[in-house]
Amino acid sequence: MKKSVKNILLGLITVVVALVATACSSGGGSNEVKVGIMGSDTRIWDVIKTNLQKEGINIKLVQFNDYDQPNQALAGGDIDLNAYQHVYFLENWNNARKTNLTAIGNTVIAPLSVYSDKIKSLNDLPNGGTIALPNDVTNQARALQLLESAGVLKLKSDVKLPSPNDVVDNPKNIKLLPLDASQTARSLSEVSASVVNNTVALDAKLDLNSAIFREPITEKSKPWINVIATKPENKDNETYKKIVAAYQTQEVADKIKEVYQGSTIPAWDYKF
C-alpha cells in the first residue's frame, strides 16, 4: 500500500514538473521577443525593454548594419519584429521579394541630411561636383527628392520613386554616386557632399548642426515614417501590440529627443 502511494506521489510530482516545464517553455519562450534594429536605436529600446520586463515580456535586441538584413531575418523567422525602416522601404522590399511583411505601428520620422567636408552650402557645389547618396531604391529616391527641394536638380514629375535616370535638369552637371547607405558618411573625404540617413550619421558621429541641408517634413513625408514590422500572421499578436504601445509613450518620445537631439522625431502622433 505504501509503495502504491509512493508511486502515485512520484507520478504526481512528474506531472507537475512537466507542467511547469511546459509553462516556462510556452510562457517564457513566447514572451521573449527578438527585435531587429540598427545601431544607435539601442538606447531607445533599452527604455522599452525595462518597462516591458514588468509585464513579463523580455525583449532581445538584434543589431544589424545593413538595410536588407533585418527584413531577411524577419522573413526567415530569425527575429520576431524589426524597427528600422520607413513605409516606402517596407513596401518596396515586399514587392521585390514577393513577401508581405506587415507594419503594426508607427515609430519615428528621420529626415535625411546633407553633409560636406568641402562646402558650407549646396549653393556652393562646384560644377561637375559629386554627391553621394544611398543606393537602395527608396532612400535613393528620397535623397533625389531632397536634392530637388534644395534646387540642385529637377526630376520627372510623374515618378513615385525616382532614380538618377529620372533627372531632367542638372545645371551644374553634378555627378550622383549611389553607395550602400552605411558608406555615405565614410565617403565625405572623396565627394563634394553626401546625403546621409540619420542612424548612419549618428553612428559616424556626425553633428546634426554641421549638416548643410536637411530634408523638409511636409504632408508628402508620410511614406517616410518608420514602422515596427512583423510577419502578417503575427499582426494581431497581443504581446506585439503591447510592444507597440510601450514604444508610443511620452517617456520614449522624450528619450528620442534626448538621444537624437532633433535628428529623429516621434511620429506616431505627428501633425503634418
Image (spheres, rainbow, N blue to C red):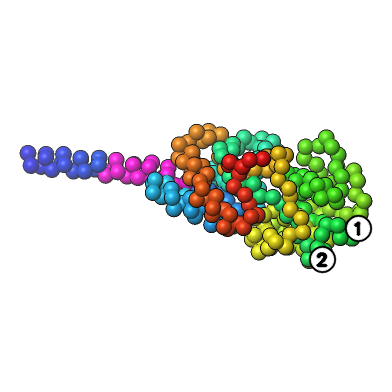
Name the residue nearer the viewer: 229 or 194: 194
Residue 232 higher or lower than 107, as above or below: above
The image quarter in which residue 162 lies:
top right
Mark 2–mark 1 distance (CA, rounded to whole Å): 14 Å
The image quarter in which residue 126 lies:
bottom right
The image quarter in which residue 181 lies:
bottom right
Helix, strand or loop at disc 1?
loop
Residue at x-position 46% and y-position 41%: 242
Instruction: For marks 2 and 1, give the one nearer the viewer.
Output: 2
16 on left or right of 197: left
The C terminus - image quarter: top right
Q: According to the image, label 1 marks what residue?
A: 128
What span is in magenta? 17-33
Q: Earlier in the sequence, mark 2 or mark 1?
A: 2
The N terminus - image quarter: top left
State yes or no: residue 247 in magenta.
Answer: no
State yes or no: residue 20 in magenta.
Answer: yes
Which mark identifies residue 87? none
For the residue marked with disc 1, what is the amino acid? Gly
In this figure, what is the number of numbered marks? 2
Helix, strand or loop at disc 2?
loop
Percent position of residue 193, x then y: 80, 59
Percent position of residue 180, x then y: 73, 54
SS majority, magenta: helix
Name the residue nearer the viewer: 245 or 23: 245
Q: According to the image, label 2 marks what residue?
A: 118
Residue 260 higher or lower than 162, as above or below: below
